[in-house]
Amino acid sequence: MLVARSNHQAARPVQREPKRDQINMFLRGLITVFLMAFSGAIAHAEGLSDRTGWKIHKTSKVYKALIDDLKAAIKAEGLITVTQAGPTKAAASRGIIIPGNRVIGVFNNDYAVRVLALSTAAMIEAPIRFYITVDQNGTATLSYKTPSHVFAPYQDEGGAALMEIAAELDMRFGRIAAGAIAD
């Protein structure tokens, strides 16, 4: 930056403190990173839209209540919660706040034995998962891929019997979802 002087003096550069410049650059960079991360979080938080083979149930329930109600409905339907995973707590431990997000895998040994008898490859899909997410308004959504959609790629190997199992599971997953989202 140049500073103007009187008629007879030449312009000369103004000296700034190097430390202040470094701090300003750091703050600008920090703000840029924050804005980029925040805009990405907003885009991610839009929620799920209709997808082929998915059932998506928006609810008026809060996240924890929907998780508890889903677990109770799974048990009532005679299936087992095999897995649970979600990035929310791990992200929080790193100082990153993300909306509630949980995947709950559901199956049982009877179905495992029956599916394995028809298609070893199809068992990669077990357990079949429910997905609970928090929407921008604070309510939770329950989503899942229908078992018939999940097992469809294995129909040539597992035949009609595999698709009958998938249809049974479709009905059971539908009842689980209905029980979980009921007020």
Image: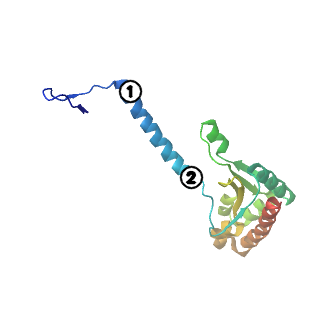
**Amino acid marked by disc 1:** Arg
Residue occupying the point 39% across, 34% down: 25
Q: Can residue 64 be seen at all in this image of the molecule?
A: yes
Q: Can residue 81 be seen at all in this image of the molecule?
A: no
Query: Which of the pair 56/139 is nearer the observer?
Result: 139
Dot 1 corresponds to which residue?
A: 20
Residue occupying the point 66% across, 58% down: 124
User: Within 10 angstroms of label 2, few (less than 14), some, or many (20 or more) residues?
Assistant: few
Question: Residue 71 in the image: x percent, y percent?
Answer: 80, 53
**SS category of the residue bearing label 1:** helix
Count of number-bearing discs: 2
Say whether residue 81 is left or right of residue 99. Answer: right
* Position of the N terminus by quadrant: top left
Dot 2 corresponds to which residue?
A: 42
Question: Residue 82 in the image: x percent, y percent?
Answer: 75, 51
User: Within 10 angstroms of label 1, few (less than 14), some, or many (20 or more) residues?
Assistant: few
> Which residue is the extreme one toward the left?
8
Residue occupying the point 79% across, 60% down: 181
Residue occupying the point 46% across, 37% down: 30
Say whether residue 22 is left or right of residue 122. Answer: left
**SS category of the residue bearing label 2:** helix
